[in-house]
Amino acid sequence: PPPPPPPPPAPFFFHAEEGTRDPLWSRGLGDVYKRQLWTQAREGCDVINIIFNNGAYSILKGELANVGARNPGRKALDMLELDRPNIDWGYLAKGMGVQATRATDTEEFNEQLARAVALPGPHLIEVMLP
């Protein structure tokens, strides 16, 4: 058999298919990604979705700095925040038929991940970051 894959980078989410775990990167694609939750529920996929929620489009903040925007205005910065209102990923997932939980610390995350691995069907764990 081929050698095992290297450990996943962070941030990551696991895509479970026929007992395999493949690390995948996510870069603020939540708006596109939420449609996939419905398909996972409809097809009964054994998938664990992990969203690391920092409340912002941090990748875009970096891009803004990369183009030399040294002092962007308040309106520009507001476009990079994901609040007013905050997105409740668990609520969205449950609305699509996916079991969902929210972890606020490492212990909660470990418990929720173990439970998601043990149960069939799609799951979403929203990990709240400071």
Image (tube, rainbow, N blue to C red):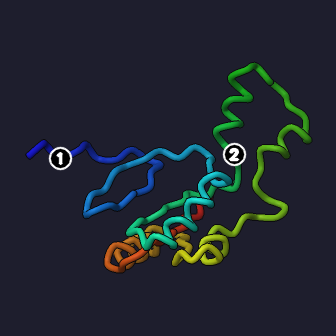
Which residue is depicted at the point 61% across and 73% down? 96
Task: Residue 63 in the image: state x and y as whole percent.
Answer: 68, 29
Secondary structure type for disc 1: loop
Mark 2: give few (<14), some (14-19) or many (20+) Cα within 10 Å: some
Q: Which residue is mark 1?
A: 4
**Nearer-N-terminus badge (2/1):** 1
Residue 57 has which mark?
A: 2
Which residue is depicted at the point 53% across and 75% down? 98
Task: Residue 21 in the image: state x and y as whole percent.
Answer: 31, 56
Nearer the viewer's eye, disc 2 or disc 1?
1
Q: What kind of residue is marked 2?
A: Tyr
Residue 85 shown left or right of residue 5 in the figure: right
Which residue is depicted at the point 69% across and 69% down? 88
Residue 96 shown left or right of residue 114 in the figure: right
Report which quarter residue 55 is drawn in: bottom right
Front residue of 61/90: it is 90
Q: Say if mark 2 contacts mark 1, CB within 8 Å.
A: no
Task: Residue 97 in the image: state x and y as whole percent.
Answer: 57, 77
